Image (cartoon, helix red, strand yellow):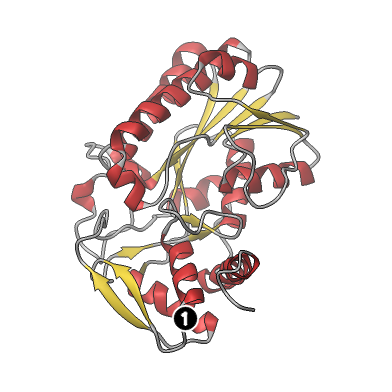
Amino acid sequence: MKILVTGAGGFIGHHLVKALKKEGHWVRGVDIKEPEFEPTAADEFELLDLRRFDCALQATRAVDRVFHLAANMGGIGFIENFKGVIVRDNTMINIHTIEAARINGVKRFLFTSSACIYPGYKQKEADVTPLKESDAYPADAEDGYGWEKLYMERTCRHYREDFGLDTRIVRFHNIFGPLGTYDGGREKAPAAMCRKIALVEDGGEIEVWGDGKQTRSFCYIDDCVEGLMRLMDSDFHDPLNLGQDRMVTIDELAYMVAAIAGKKIRLRHELNRPLGVRGRNSDNSLLRQVLKWEPQISLEEGLRVTYEWIRGELIKTGRLKA
């Protein structure tokens, strides 16, 4: 098939392009930047700003399917502090891209949503009940980022019902792995932990945001990409969780990385940092039912690969001695 991946210069998009090429598809990648750490595998890569409708029309021309990953986003520190920018940019990107896909006769359109659409009132405890897709309503999404994702989910539904565009919707739960941002303010917890622990001396101290008892589940990038391709090929059009259903505390995450690094560490908890919800976990019941599959790669295995890659990058850039 001829496939467009928007956000192909980003972490998930870059991995997805490589996987689609391995399956023999022709792939166009589109982003405002090229992949940061290695060249793209795409047949075509175009630098386009999807906030502009003419760019969205150019991006979606002559393709059968669209994996729509393009977004202005980052970890909790970013999404808590740049809500206006996120809502403005992502709403324009999303509406322009789906409308351009409709005009250009795209057959199938997959939108990548987020677990941030789930209501805050269901995530107030660390020992949280895993979130089912049906828990999204009554809505109380993460302010800014979560609301624009939820709005686009509804847009996909209406484009399918009113215009016949065959849509898919996936809700990511904390995707991590190599070739992703690990510094600069947009990185997420696993990458931040790997960087901090790689740089600290054995027996040293690292900063952890919050009291460390907040909980999350984390899904390795290879499982994420496998799930994306399986969902696109399925006949399921309602929102679907994609993540691991194993919940850990942020302190546990830090100690896992330290064990991989072979270091003993001390944790300094910073309570005045952005935290997000108290607890979040994915209910994968519907995922297993729909795709006859679920993520396979353990958190420890994924962290090991991610840590070694980040450590290698720190050595390569001179921030760490080999």
Q: Measuring 52% from the left and 54% from the top, which residue is drawn there?
A: 181
Q: How many marks?
A: 1
Q: Is residue 57 visible?
A: yes
> Is residue 135 visible from the viewing direction of this image?
no
Res 234 quadrant in image: top right
* Mark 1 element type: helix
Q: Is residue 106 above or below residue 136?
A: above
Tell me if 48 is positioned left or right of 195 in this view. right
Q: Residue furthest front?
A: 318
Pick the front one: 77 or 171: 77
Q: Which quarter of the rendering shows the N terminus? A: top right
Residue found 48% across the figure and 22% down from its top: 51
Task: Locate residue 64: give its quadrant.
Answer: top right
Task: Find residue 136 and report its horizontal and vertical position in percent.
Answer: 30, 40
Please tell me how crowded label 1 is: few (under 14), some (14-19), or many (20+) other residues with Cα within 10 Å: many
> Where in the figure is residue 160, as x and y percent of width and height?
48, 20
Pick the front one: 41 or 196: 196
* In the image, residue 28 above or below residue 278: above
Q: Residue at x 53, y 81 (%)?
A: 261
Residue lying farthest to the right in this orientation? 24
Q: Nearer the viewer, residue 12 or 317?
A: 317
Residue 264 in the image: x percent, y percent? 43, 88
Q: What residue does disc 1 label?
A: 258
Looking at the image, residue 172 sits to the left or right of residue 277; the answer is right
* Badge 1 amino acid: Ala
Q: Quadrant of residue 59?
A: top right
The picture places residue 305, in percent across and down from the top left corner, at 61, 69
Q: Which image quarter holds the C terminus?
A: bottom right
Q: Is residue 250 above or below residue 61?
A: below
**Residue 315 in the figure: left or right of residue 52:** right
